[in-house]
Amino acid sequence: MPFKRNQTKPVSIGGLTLGGNDEIIVQSMCNIKTSCVEEVSKQINEAASFGAKIMRLSVLDFHDASAIREIKKKVSIPLVADIHMDYRLALASLESGVDAIRINPGNIGDEKRIEEVLREALKRHVPIRIGVNGGSIDKALLKEKGSLSRSALLFESAKKHIGILNKYGFDDIVLSLKGSDALETMEAYRLAAQSFPYPLHLGVTEAGPKDVSLIRSTIALAPLLMEGIGNTIRISLTEDPIEEVKAANRLLLDLGLKKDWPRFISCPTCGRTEVRLLPLAKKVLQYLEEHRINKTVAIMGCAVNGPGEAKQADIGLAGAKDCFVLFKKGKAIKTLPQDIAFETLIEELKNLY
Ligand code: SF4
């Protein structure tokens, strides 16, 4: 690990340990109604094949809560039920065998309801993630401490919810403090890491479509991860969850916090490019990630500078006049017509593993 990790209490989620170690777990959330058991299970299994270790499901009604039991039979990674307000849905999800619950105890209402949920969660060794969001900080807190910064409000809100769980002796807690602003989110997590012993789920909320969110999420998450903060990450995208999982893995790879993911290099192209580079680069990246080929592969625009610029690549292609040069570790091996470049590269790659 290139950065020393902040040590937290370990929390077990369906046999997976979150915190208390150096691992950073990738997770995402299904974007299909949970009661559609077949489609949801398929999406979870696909996300798992791309390296998701936890998936979250929205539980909006009792159909969703009872579907968890069926989904559990078809998938092999832990599931988190995402619940707002209705404590009965938390109880029903627990009954269905969910591995964790995301609920904010301060939103459940009556203390008896909180106690009931906590008793069931404790009995089943199911942790609770307190998920504080910038858009839903409770009104009482805003009234009392409204002059504080947004980061401090996220922190105070988390503290309030933790206080409720601790009051009932509940300590299996995971925390998230997500704002939609990268810098305020980052500061809120720093405050939490200094003050609470619980594992942190990092993310920026409502981060936008891919082009916007990738930048916003990286601004917030990369410094935190480099400071040793964070035990699980979700990169929220207005996109398919598989894209979230890929993005999270790429971020961890580039920070040196993960090794088992393909490293892809391609040049921006320039006036020297005489091949159709962009479609080829996209196709190769997709193949590498789909097949989890954990090699360094470069797709470069010209044979003059390409191989030299991508010396660290295990293998690559560099464009020439309407053809490609195949290179390994910076050395040209053979020349290929454009129409067989992809297939030849894949064949050569297979010889490497
Ligand atoms: S590798 Fe060649 S084509 Fe690509 S940016 Fe560099 S000089 Fe231009």
Image (cartoon, grey):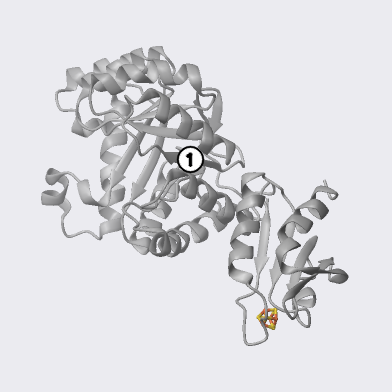
Relative to 270, residue 235 above or below? above
Bin the neighbour count of mark 1 within 10 Å (Cα to Cα): few under 14, some 14-19, many 20 and up: many
Quadrant of the snapshot with the C terminus: top right
Q: Is mark 1 within 8 Å of ligand 1?
A: no
The amino acid pointed to by label 1 is Gln
Residue 61, image x and y in percent? 22, 24
Q: Which residue lies most toward the bottom here?
A: 271
Q: Is residue 249 above or below residue 208?
A: above
Quadrant for residue 279, please give it.
bottom right
Q: Report the residue at 74% width, 61% height from top.
A: 340
Residue nearer the viewer, 255 or 207: 207
Numbered disc total = 1
Is 322 drawn above or below residue 93 in the view shown? below
Q: Residue at x 54, y 24 (%)?
A: 76
Residue 92 is at least partly visible in this image: yes
Q: Is residue 255 visible?
A: no
Specify whether 315 is left or right of 203. Answer: right
- From the top left corner, tell me how far across and down residue 160 is, in percent: 26, 39
The local secondary structure at tag 1 comes to strand
Apparent side of residue 157 relative to residue 75 in the rendered image (left or right): left
Horizontal and vertical percent position of residue 102: 34, 32
> Looking at the image, which residue is at 19% across and 33% down?
107
| In-image side of 223 versus 170 (left or right) | right
Q: Position of residue 143 (x, y in %)?
A: 10, 50
Q: Nearer the viewer, residue 65 or 216?
A: 65
Which residue does the numbered mark 1 point to in the structure image? 27
- Residue 95 is drawn in which quadrant? top left
Which of the two residues, 241 or 161, is positioned nearer the viewer here? 241
Instruction: Name the quarter showing ligand 1.
Output: bottom right
